[in-house]
Image: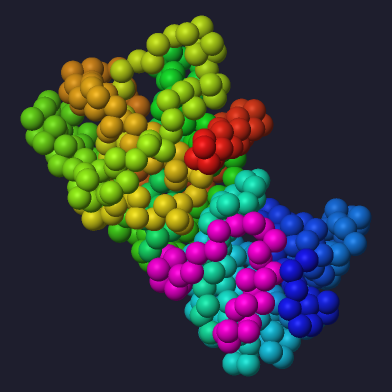
Amino acid sequence: MATFPGAEDFVIGLIGMGDMGKMYARRLSSAGWRIMACDREDKYDELVAEFANHKNIQILRNGHLVSRASNYIIYSVEAAAISRVVAQYGPSTRLGAIVGGQTSCKDPEIKAFEEHLPTDVDIVSCHSLHGPNVDPRDQPLVLIKHRASDASFAKVETVLRCLGSKHVYLTAREHDRITADTQAVTHAAFLSMGKAWHANQQFPWEGTRYVGGIENVKINLMLRIYAQKWHVYAGLAILNPEAHKQINQFAKSTTELFYLMLEGRSAELRERVYAAKEKVFGREASPKWGDKPLLPDGVVDRFSLNANAKNNAPPMPNNHLSLLAMVDCWSALGIVPYDHMICSTPLFRLWLGVTEHLFRTPGLLDESLRVGIEDNTFRRDDLQFTIAASGWAECVALRQFETWRERFAVTQKFFEPRFEGAVEMGQAMIKAVLESEKE
């Protein structure tokens, strides 16, 4: 265990024992740190039983007890609840303690800390940019020194070093802008895919249309997202003020490109897409353009849920509206995705990787544009995808958490029978891509 003066008596408190809270508890306790944790009081007995064999983890009944006993307290609750939870337990914070949060959106988190924590408390927030089932080693971990002494910040760094993550130093606003650029629109794309396939009552892995590496990424990551808790994505999109314009622009790009395809305006479609390509992937915009691709050839081809892939069925030409809209959105907002690679999630790197593949592979982009104008094979799916993207954007603009939850839940139930196998396959895909990056 990394140490500092007084580390042997240093207690880490975790308020919120969802998937990420539990991951932190296990990782930090395994490194020798003493953990005191809680969730809602009705979960007390269940958590006591679950962590009975973890000698460094003590489950307490509520956040008051955790706050009074801990030197460093991490709130690991959903972004929509952070203000209420900090208002409830913040006043009990131990004198001179360090407090931080693990939410994916820092704007409401920091506001809650400033409003409800005692002034003698230091604030150092963090955010692990990956899911609870991803190995944190070498993944980005954002650290935000909002109101803290150098000594307090050093203690937080020392504690979290056991995760093996790459520390990234940002302000709360920088964090929210980058996560909006790299996560909010990416999530919107996969959420819209799921809604489109659900609307057409199809499991895309059962037919012959969605075969091949790009389709594997779409299907596996769509299922991965819908297998998670709804509030993870709702909070990031609705509560992050930087995310609203990104999600709105993605819906706008999707709609306008789909109209060009429907109306057969081939020259205008090509001009717009190639202009976006130059802004996002051109050498002046991104020095990374000349480097090796994010997805080496064939790395995602083997991760297929589709039986037709095992029969060597060739991929069907697809206009890949979702990918074209993503690049058009980045172009319209002046976003160069490579600029944020230090803060990118595994999911974002996969999405950027297949997008890069479409735009870099000779002939593939032109084929996509041709299909968009001449081929109606994917027209029904594209229509529902466009409707879904606009629906998510409206939900975000109106800040409708309940509507988001209902939209998410009904599609989640539709795909639920295939979550078990898909989550494992998606995890294996991410692992393979991360390993290829190290080569």
Residue at the top extreme, as displayed: 311
The residue that appears at 29% across and 27% down in the rendered structure is 361
Q: How far from the left and from the top, in percent, is residue 364?
A: 27, 24
Magenta span contains residue 156: yes
Instruction: Please determine whether, in this image, residue 394 is positioned above or below residue 104.
Output: above
| Quadrant, the N terminus | bottom right
Q: How far from the left and from the top, in percent, is residue 29?
A: 80, 62
Q: How is the image coloured?
A: rainbow
The residue that appears at 53% across and 41% down in the rendered structure is 438
Specify start and end residues of the magenta stretch as a single range: 148-176
Instruction: Please determine whether, in this image, residue 123 is positioned above or below residue 40.
Output: below
The residue that appears at 50% across and 11% down in the rendered structure is 308
Q: How far from the left and from the top, in percent, is residue 416?
A: 61, 33
Can you see residue 382? no
Residues 273 and 404: in front is: 273
Q: How far from the left and from the top, in percent, is residue 426?
A: 57, 34
Magenta span contains residue 352: no
Q: Is residue 101 left or right of residue 44?
A: left
Quarter where residue 413 is shown: top right
The residue that appears at 23% across and 55% down in the rendered structure is 334
Instruction: Please determine whether, in this image, residue 415 is positioned above or below residue 71.
Output: above
Residues 287 and 21: in front is: 287
Q: In this view, does 234 lie to the left or right of 363?
A: right
